[in-house]
Amino acid sequence: MEKKIYKELNKSETETTINILYKENMLSIYTNKVDLQKQLCKTLGEPTKEYIKGKSIMASRWDMSLNEKSKISKMMLKANIFEL
């Protein structure tokens, strides 16, 4: 497995967005925070999309069905998404 290289952004530019798409029955999580990306990779697996610049990962997005309640619960407990 290839080691992933993450690019740390300016702290004032970090963001995490959680969207609930009711019509599509989907939860979408986007973050450019390096520590959170690593935690989510461990908890949820590979992201749906990685935003790459050069060889570095700038941000990642995970999409999952709202029916995956155990996966969502695990993510809420293990990945500290509300950390400021």
Image (spheres, rainbow, N blue to C red):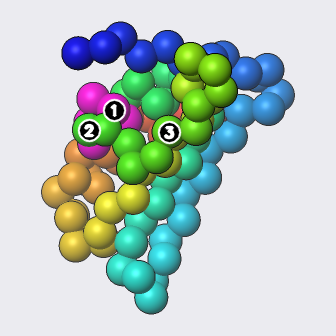
Q: Earlier in the sequence, mark 1 or mark 3?
A: 1
Residue situated in front as seen by the camera: 81 or 9: 9
Residue sitting at 37 percent across and 28 percent down?
39
Residue most extreme to the left: 70
**Residue at numbered disc 3:** 50
Q: In this orientation, does residue 82 appear? A: no
Q: What's the magenta region?
A: 40-44
Residue sitting at 42 percent across and 16 percent down?
4
Q: What residue type is labelled 3?
A: Glu
**Which tag is nearer the camera, tag 3 or tag 2?**
3
Residue sitting at 29 percent across and 55 percent down?
72
Residue sitting at 82 percent across and 28 percent down?
12
Q: In this view, does 22 lie above or below 2?
A: below
**Which SS class for mark 1?**
helix
Q: To which quarter of the image does residue 80 belong?
A: top left
Residue most extreme to the bottom: 23
- Which quadrant is the N terminus positioned in? top left
Q: What residue type is labelled 1?
A: Cys
**Residue at numbered disc 1:** 41
Q: Earlier in the sequence, mark 3 or mark 2?
A: 2
Residue 35 x %, y %: 50, 21
The reply to whether dot 1 and dot 2 touch (C-beta < 8 Å) is: yes
- Disc 3 versus disc 2: distance between alpha carbons? 12 Å
Q: What residue type is labelled 2?
A: Gly
